[in-house]
Image (cartoon, rainbow, N blue to C red):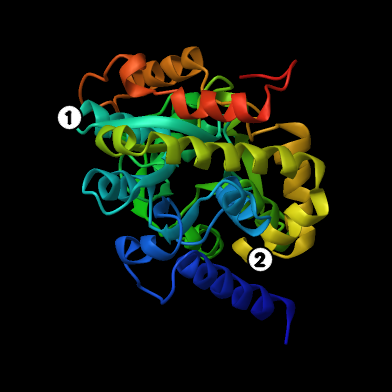
């Protein structure tokens, strides 16, 4: 069996393991399983296949950190952060993981959504284009790939266009599934895509005609990226559970920085990419950019700046609530008390 089928089989096995973690039978309701173990948290991720940036929950699961703190999870992969935010609002998920934009808009639209943690407080994506596109301005009139308007990749596309003095009206939006961006670039359906780091690394190796036009962290270095969030009602009823979840996730972040080989193994299995691609991505994301927070990852100044950027881009649908209502640092603060704060690192 070739390396690629083995990777795809591993993805399926990881997904099945996540769905059955902490419960007796596949599909067993959390309430039914609670009598025989810890409550099962329904956690949603914003891509159909888990990305490197979202793999902290898998590290926490596979290395036993969740179990250490009495947490069991049922992981669901959805098509975008917009879908995750809607599922949290509807009560279909207990905790969501998504980029910050749909979470802020959910709260601005009257949902009782509240940010409780961060999987990455720094951007981990790049704009990838054919090599004949040398600047963002060269995208004028071209088809560019997005998921949903207001979802993360569309927002990042706006930031890239802004660098070239363009707006969405100057390009053609083409809806593309998150796992199909590279194929759409190769067959010419689109001329620009926002790719996760591992996707960009893989594309540059496989297709010499593609290149990274820009890394978004260089465009907006103070932009807050990924959040864990819940409804205020759920948080009020499950604050201790939320604290234990954030403790396990923070422990996973710290583990990832000091255990490259094992992190690469877990992420490669989850994403379907070869170890060499994930190892190169690890060096970019953890060694160079340090995207996973070692403490709470909830810098309110950074989050406020991001909300301001959303407003300037025209993607904030209504008035966002004050930061102290949008962000509840309590569970993450408790996690740091449990683990000890690491000095000389960002919040």
Mark 2 and mark 1 lie on one chain; the one further toward the N terminus is 1
Query: Which percent across, then down, holds residue 326?
Result: 33, 23
Q: Residues within 10 Å of mark 1 (few under 14, many from 20)?
A: few
* Quarter of the view holding residue 153: top left
- Are the two marked residues, 2 and 1, in contact with CB atoms closer than 8 angstroms? no
268 or 61: which is nearer to us?
61
Disc 2 target residue: 269
Outermost residue to the bottom: 1
Residue drawn 39% across the image and 30% down it: 115
Q: Work out whether residue 161 can be spotted.
A: no
Query: Which percent across, then down, holds residue 124?
Result: 60, 39
Q: Is residue 342 above or below residue 277?
A: above
Q: Is residue 51 above or below residue 127?
A: below
Residue drawn 48% across the image and 32% down it: 117
In the displayed structure, does residue 329 sit left or right of residue 135? left
Residue drawn 49% across the image and 35% down it: 243
In the displayed structure, does residue 237 sit left or right of residue 36? left
Outermost residue to the left: 110
Name the quadrant of the N terminus.
Answer: bottom right
Q: Is residue 142 above or below residue 180?
A: above
Name the quadrant of the C terminus.
Answer: top right
**Kind of element beneath mark 1:** loop
* Quarter of the view holding residue 182: bottom right
Disc 1 target residue: 110
Query: Which percent across, then down, holds residue 62?
Result: 64, 59
Residue drawn 65% across the image and 55% down it: 64
Query: Which percent across, then down, holds residue 121?
Result: 56, 29
């Amino acid at each position: 069996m070739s390396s690629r089928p083995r990777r795809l089989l591993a993805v399926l096995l990881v997904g099945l393991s996540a769905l059955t973690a902490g419960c007796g039978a596949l599909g067993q309701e959390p309430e039914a399983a609670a009598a025989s173990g810890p409550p099962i948290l329904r956690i949603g991720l914003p891509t159909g296949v888990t990305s490197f940036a979202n793999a902290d929950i898998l590290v926490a699961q596979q290395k036993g950190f969740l179990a250490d703190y009495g947490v069991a999870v049922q992981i669901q992969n959805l098509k975008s952060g917009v879908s995750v935010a809607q599922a949290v609002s509807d009560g279909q998920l207990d905790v969501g993981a998504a980029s910050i934009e749909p979470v802020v808009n959910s709260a601005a639209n009257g949902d009782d959504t509240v940010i409780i943690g961060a999987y990455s407080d720094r951007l981990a994506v790049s704009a990838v284009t054919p090599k004949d596109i040398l600047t963002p301005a060269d995208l004028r009139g071209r088809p560019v790939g997005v998921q949903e308007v207001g979802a993360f990749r569309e927002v990042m596309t706006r930031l890239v266009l802004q660098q070239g003095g363009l707006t969405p009206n100057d390009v053609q939006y083409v809806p593309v599934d998150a796992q199909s961006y590279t194929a759409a670039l190769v067959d010419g359906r689109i001329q620009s895509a926002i790719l996760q780091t591992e996707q960009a690394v893989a594309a540059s190796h496989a297709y010499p005609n593609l290149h990274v036009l820009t890394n978004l962290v260089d465009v907006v270095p103070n932009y807050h990226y990924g959040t864990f969030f819940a409804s205020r009602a759920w948080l009020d009823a499950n604050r201790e559970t939320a604290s234990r979840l954030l403790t396990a996730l923070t422990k996973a972040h710290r583990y990832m920085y000091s255990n490259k080989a094992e992190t690469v193994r877990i992420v490669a299995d989850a994403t379907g990419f070869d170890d060499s691609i994930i190892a190169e991505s690890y060096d970019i994301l953890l060694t160079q950019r340090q995207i996973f927070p070692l403490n709470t990852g909830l810098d309110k100044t950074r989050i406020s700046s991001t909300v301001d950027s959303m407003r300037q881009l025209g993607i904030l649908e209504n008035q966002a609530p004050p930061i102290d209502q949008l962000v509840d640092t309590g569970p993450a603060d408790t996690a740091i008390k449990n683990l000890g704060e690491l000095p000389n690192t960002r919040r």
